[in-house]
């Protein structure tokens, strides 16, 4: 199993709630509408909870997406549909300079 973990900040001038609403109501449906999304086995979006006023969270969201294989992951991310329909939307809600992406294999310690 392959998992992609992506952390990012919201676009400047966008409130936290606008960011979360856009992610849920606009971007997620775009992603799920393309046929290549069938390769995603699990998809989770995590948002920071309470933090100290002096400590700004490094990310406004972390996305985790699981795939059966690296090939399945590439079928999504390297598809024409992703490149032309999904990826161009990222600029509408993400600060693209903040994106950190890590492709991992999980070692489950407790389940």
Image: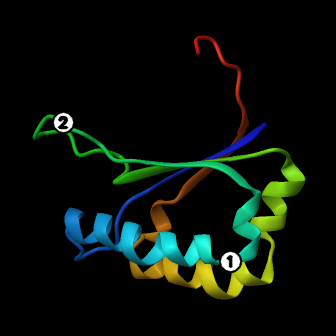
Q: What residue lies at 18% left-to-right and 36% top-to-bottom? A: 51
| For the residues bearing labels 1 and 2, Cβ distance under 8 angstroms | no
x, y percentage for residue 111?
A: 58, 15
73 and 98: which is toward the camera: 73
Label 1 residue SS? loop
Residue 103 in percent (x, y) is at 71, 45
Residue sticking out furthest to the bottom: 84
Q: Is residue 72 above or below residue 4?
A: below
Q: Is residue 52 left or right of residue 111?
A: left
Classify 10 Å Cα crowding around label 2: few (below 14), some (14-19), many (20 and above).
few
Residue designated by label 1: 34
Q: Position of residue 77 (x, y in %)?
A: 74, 67
Instruction: Tell which residue pokes out farthest to the right in this image.
Output: 71
Residue under the point 80% across and 76% down: 79
* Left or right of 61 on screen, residue 40: right
Picture quadrant of residue 68: top right
- Which sits in the foreground, 41 or 3? 41
Q: How is the image coloured?
A: rainbow
The disc label shown at residue 25, or none: none
Q: Secondary structure beneath disc 2? A: loop
Q: Residue at x 46, y 60 (%)?
A: 98
Q: Which residue is mark 2?
A: 51
Q: How many marks?
A: 2
Can you say whether 55 is above or below 71 in the image? Answer: above
Earlier sequence position, callout 1 versus callout 2 = 1
Q: Name the quarter where the N terminus is drawn.
A: top right
Is the residue marked by circle 1 packed among few (<14), some (14-19), or many (20+) residues within 10 Å? some
Vertical placement of 19 versus 2: above or below? below
Closer to the camera in the image, 43 or 58 = 43
Q: Residue at x 19, y 69 (%)?
A: 15
């Amino acid at each position: 199993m392959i998992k992609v973990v992506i952390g990012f900040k919201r676009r400047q001038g966008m409130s936290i709630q606008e960011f979360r609403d856009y992610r849920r109501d606009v971007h997620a449906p775009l992603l799920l509408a393309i046929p290549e999304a069938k390769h995603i086995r699990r998809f989770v979006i995590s948002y920071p909870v309470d933090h100290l006023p002096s400590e700004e969270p490094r990310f406004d969201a972390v996305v985790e997406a699981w795939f059966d294989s690296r090939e399945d992951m590439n079928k999504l991310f390297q598809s024409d549909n992703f490149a032309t329909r999904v990826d161009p939307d990222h600029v509408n809600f993400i600060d693209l300079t903040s994106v950190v992406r890590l492709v991992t294999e999980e070692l489950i310690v407790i389940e």
